[in-house]
Each structure stands twice: as C-alpha cells, then as structure tokens.
Amino acid sequence: MTEVSVETAPTVLELTGVSRQFGAVRALSDVSFECRPGEIHALVGENGSGKSTLLGIASGFVEPDKGTVLIGGKPLRRDSPALARKLGLAMAYQDGSSVGAEPVKNNFYMAAPPDKRPPYWRRKKWARKLLAEFDLEMELFPDVPAGFLTMAERQLFEVAKALVTEPKVLLLDEPTTALGPDEVEALHRTILACKRQGVGVVYVSHRLPEVLEVADRITVLRDGKTQGTFDARTTSEAELVERIVGRPFEAAFPPPAPRKDEPEEVLVVDGLQGQSFGPVSFTLQRGEIVGIAGAEGNGQPQLFDCLAGRTPPRAGRVICDGKELSLVSTHEPLAAGLMLLPGNRKLEALMGVLGVRVNATIQSLNKFTTLGILRRGAERKAVNELVEQLEIRTPSIDQPVEFLSGGNQQKVSVARSFLREPAVIMAYEPTQGVDIGARFDIYSALRSRADAGAAILVKSSDPIELSGLCDRVLVMSRGTIVEEIPGDELDEVRIVEAIVRGPGMSRSARSPLGAAMPKAPSSSNGASGEGSA
C-alpha cells in the first residue's frame, strides 16, 4: 500500500486545513484534500467519517469553521454554492436534486448554465441529444416527468445533469448505489471520458472494488481525519478496509460457537416450486448460517418471497419447527417463526417517518403488553439494549429512521428480527448499500443470533461475504439448487467457480478461475443486474 505525497501540480479542487463541528460532534478535523485535472480521486470511509461534510464544504453548501477551498485555483467564499458552480464545480447528488413534477427536458434546462441552454422551444431535441451523448445506459424520454424514473435512472440522470454544466471538477456522491453491473460499466466509461478531457473527478463510494477499478488515488477518512492518500494501482481492498475501520479484514467474520447438541432440523424445504424457480429442496439446522449464491435472475428473490408467504407455491411443502406451512399469506410463516429481512429496507422493511423504537418493535408488541396495555419501560429497555448491541448510531431511539445512515437503517431492520426471536431468519442481501464498518457489525449480529439457536438463510451477491459468514453455501442456477458447497471447501474462488459452471458441467471441467480472482478480499455488495448462469 503506497501512500502518495501531495504534489505541487495544478489542482481543480483543493481543500486545506478544513474543520467543521456540528454541536458536540466534530465532523472534520484539519482535513486537506486535492483533485488534479484529469484525475479520478476517490474518497472512502465509513458512514459518519466526514465524506458528506467534505463534499458539502467543497460545493459551498456547508461553511467550514476553518480552512480554505480553492476551485480552479480561485478561492470559494464561504457558504456560496452559486460561486462554486460558476468556478466550474458540479455535483451529482446521492438523493437526487430533480424536480419530480417537471419532465426530463425541463430538468436538463434548469441544470444547464444560461450560456449552455438552447432556445426554449428546442429543449426536447437538445435533451434527447444529450442523453445519447452521455452513453449512460439510459433510455429516457425527454417528456417523462423526473419523478417517474426508477432509482437507477435517477442516479444516472443526476450525473447527466452535472455533466451538462461542462464542469472542471465533478463530485460524485455514491453514484452507483442503485445501479447494476452494466449501468456501472456505462458510468465508468463516462467518467473515464471526463478524465481524458481534463476534468477532475471526486468519486465517493463504499464499493471498494469499483473504487480500485476506476480511481487513480484514494483518500481514506476515519472519524473526521484523513488516514492517508494512496495509489490505487498498488493498494488492495484488504489494506483499504483496515485503514477505513481500524482493524484487519480477517476480523469481519466471527467464528461459530462450538455446538453442544446434535444437529436439529428447523426448516425443511421439499420440492418447493413457484414462479421462476423450482423444484428446490434443502434443510436448515439450528445454529447454522446457510448461503444462497448464484447469478441474478435465477430465482433467488422468488424463492425468498415464496418462503415468506408473499407469493403462493405451485408445488412442494415447507415445514418450520415441525409445522407444515401453506404459504398463502405472510402471517402464517411469521407466526411459525419464519421471518424475512428484505433487501430493500426503505420500501419493504422500514417506515422512514417513524422512530427507531417503533420500527424495531412493530412486529413484537405482544412481548411488551400486559392485558392489552403496552409496558413502555420494558419496550424502551429492550430497544436500547439492541441499539447498544448492534452499535446503531442514533441520537435517540425515537429518532425517525429516515435521518439515519443506510448502515444504521439496516441495523434497525436486523433489530426488528432479533426482537421477534424467529426460528429462521431469511436475510436477503443483508449488507447491500452499507459501509464496511456496518457490515462488520451485521456479520457479528447474525452470527450471535445463530449461536443463540436461530437458523439463518442468507442470499448475497458477494462471494467473499458468503465464504466468510456461512457454514455452507447452496448455489442456484435456472431456478434450482445445482450444488452444495460444504464449510471445509468454502472460499470465494470455489463459489464463483460453481456459479459460472452452472448445471450440467462437472467440477473437472471447470475453468481455472483461481488465477483470475483477486487475492485481496472484496467488500463489494452492490446491486446486481439480470443474468443467467
């Protein structure tokens, strides 16, 4: 891991000795950061490390307590986003900045500087031309309201709006959280084209493989302080992880506790068949974590939906804790002890306007009631204990979850499943969209729940995660389980080989993927596109 010294080369963005405090929280402490023309400079760190504050200061939206900001060598007056844009800075916002009721063409028009705008009556043709030029895997119609776009389309549209300004420096705040592999590839092509044109790009992301793929230099933030700037060509994911969280990657996955009793089956899936999958058969034992691997589009989400009672099966049977389930509604699996931890926490798991306490206890209120009266003291005590156990960063258990980071929101979802104390937890992409530190905490929490006697089924697109967390892994292809990998054979290469090999090919015929796999552990857990193994 080679640390790069700060050179005197020209910069398009330079922050020197920047500090910012919010109340008792010091977000940044004497941070210096620079981006040169034609450079992709990544900024990485846990949620709460200061990345967003740094971007806010660079873009003029946040006023630093001390320090200076230069854009193109010219000073940025404090708290002046209009001046930042005038000096050549553009930012693609993680949460979007479009006017939802206005069509794509009008949002483009409003984003562009006055001297870059066409005549008003030509904005539709102009917008269509821009969408084609940016090559961002978008098939948008200029007349479609921005509010009708998918999450992936909105993210790409944010980048396109930023590029309309023809910036000298482009800030990208988690630009790939909702993107699949093809869309990420298209975005990276666009970023590299900007680099060739001399644009400086600041790339903020928790997806380390993507960072290492596209960046020239990487600056690590932890607790509001820089941990160094490193050459992306000579830096591994494992080294970055250790810098980000302050402990080695090997500490991410706690070992299982020794089993004292004979294995006990808690879930039996026998010939289960549903929409886009099946027949599928497997068992889960108490105290074990079993992974589901496979390329996207091979029936994994449909399997989980069926087990949770969201969609009825076409054939087969499911037995949980000795009781056969009909799976005609979500109530029966939940009552039997089969609980789903959904992949999309914002749409499927959490109520953003409600607090941590309500979201955590909404499915377990009977535990805290006597004769129909809620025992608030017991409820608050249980939630506070889980907040401490899962290290949920929140000022209060009544804080609305929409104001928490993605990692802390996911921990609230995990807390809900813990309070319910189900026999089986089905975790669908449990670390999707969360930072490295939060992943460590979630891995530890899932293992502790398994050690307490629960069986856990984990679907993950990250082979590193599956190999480190699980006791065994089931590989799905074309809707069926084509291979089971036991614990003594688990590693990321073995999992990838099984996914690529698919059905109908012997192990002896598999390609030697070991040479192609990176040696450093991956922390990627991103959204996946469609495919078939």
Image: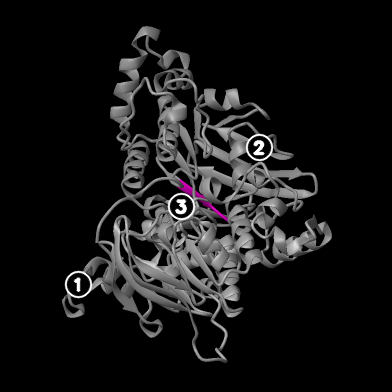
For discs 1 and 3, the disc positioned in front in the rendered view: 1
Q: Residues within 10 Å of mark 1 (few under 14, many from 20)?
A: few
Which amino acid type is marked by label 1?
Answer: Ser
Q: Residues within 10 Å of mark 2 (few under 14, many from 20)?
A: some
Which x, y percent locates residue 270? 35, 73
Q: Which residue is mark 2?
A: 68
In front of the other: 88 or 384: 384
- Residue 75 vs residue 239: left or right? right
Locate the C terminus by quadrant. Answer: bottom left
Which x, y percent locates residue 236? 43, 65
Which x, y percent locates residue 363? 64, 57
Instruction: Say what secondary structure mark 3 lies in.
Output: strand
Which x, y percent locates residue 366? 71, 61
Q: Give the quarter of the image for residue 103.
A: top left
Placement of 224 over or under 186, stated as above or below: below
Identify the mark at residue 217; answer none if there is no mark. Answer: 3
Q: Can residue 520 be seen at all in this image of the molecule? A: no
Residue under the image location 80 percent in, 49 percent down? 24
Q: CA distance from mark 3 to mark 2?
A: 22 Å
Which amino acid type is marked by label 2?
Answer: Thr
For discs 1 and 2, the disc positioned in front in the rendered view: 1
Residue under the image location 81 percent in, 59 percent down? 375
